[in-house]
Amino acid sequence: MLATEKLVAWELPLDPARLIVAELATNAALHGRVPGRSFRLALSVVPPHTLRIELTDTRGDRLPVSPRTTVAAYAESGYGLLLVEELADRWGVRCEPVPSKTVWAELDLGAEPSVSGHETSHRIDQ
């Protein structure tokens, strides 16, 4: 996965970032996809020492709802955003110009990260 390669290159911890990327990418592919269009993954390190993960898809009409109110006790699916909520320090949804939205999550990194090559953002189109 390209996101994992970027996290390694930036010398950032893989977990829980790659789990959050996987859940948000899965949601974008399953629920945010429009035939002929894809989604965009963006990773960035923003002040103060925060990894920001953003997934933008082309289904602005399908906004995620609070995972605590939508997952049935014995459901086999629907736990993706619940995992993101538990793993991320913050997460949310930003409405973009129609027809898209961005679901984002942030992880506090603690000490200042040593991002290699002074590159602090990376975009991956899927």
Image (tube, rainbow, N blue to C red):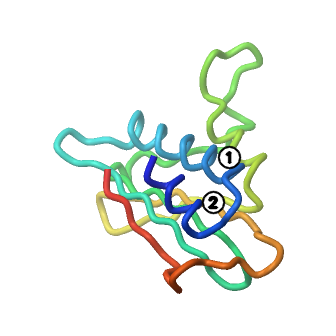
Q: Residues within 10 Å of mark 1 (few under 14, many from 20)?
A: many
32 left or right of 118 in image: left
97 left or right of 89 in image: left
Q: Secondary structure at mark 1?
A: helix
Position of residue 50 relative to residue 86, above or below, is: below
Q: Residue at x 36, y 58 (%)?
A: 40
How far apart marks 2 and 1 lie (CA) works out to 8 Å
Viewer-proximal residue among 117 and 68: 117
Q: Amino acid at mark 1?
A: Val
Q: Residues within 10 Å of mark 2 (few under 14, many from 20)?
A: many
User: Which numbered dot is residue 43?
Assistant: none
Q: Amino acid at mark 2?
A: Ala
Viewer-proximal residue among 99 and 9: 9
97 left or right of 18 in image: left
Viewer-proximal residue among 5 and 62: 5
- Residue furthest right in the image: 110
Where residue 72 sits, quadrant-wise, is: top right
User: Which numbered dot is residue 84?
Assistant: 1
Q: Residue at x 75, y 37 (%)?
A: 68
Q: Residue at x 67, y 44 (%)?
A: 66
Q: Secondary structure at mark 2?
A: strand
Residue 56 appears at what percent x and percent y?
41, 58
Pick whichever of labels 2 and 1 is earlier in the sequence. 1
Q: Residue at x 51, y 62 (%)?
A: 6
Residue 35 appears at what percent x and percent y?
20, 39
Viewer-proximal residue among 41 and 60: 41
Position of residue 7 relative to residue 49, above or below, is: above
Residue 70 appears at what percent x and percent y?
66, 31
User: Which numbered dot is residue 105?
Assistant: 2
30 left or right of 38 in image: right
Callouts 2 and 1 close, C-beta under 8 Å:
yes
Residue 106 appears at what percent x and percent y?
67, 64
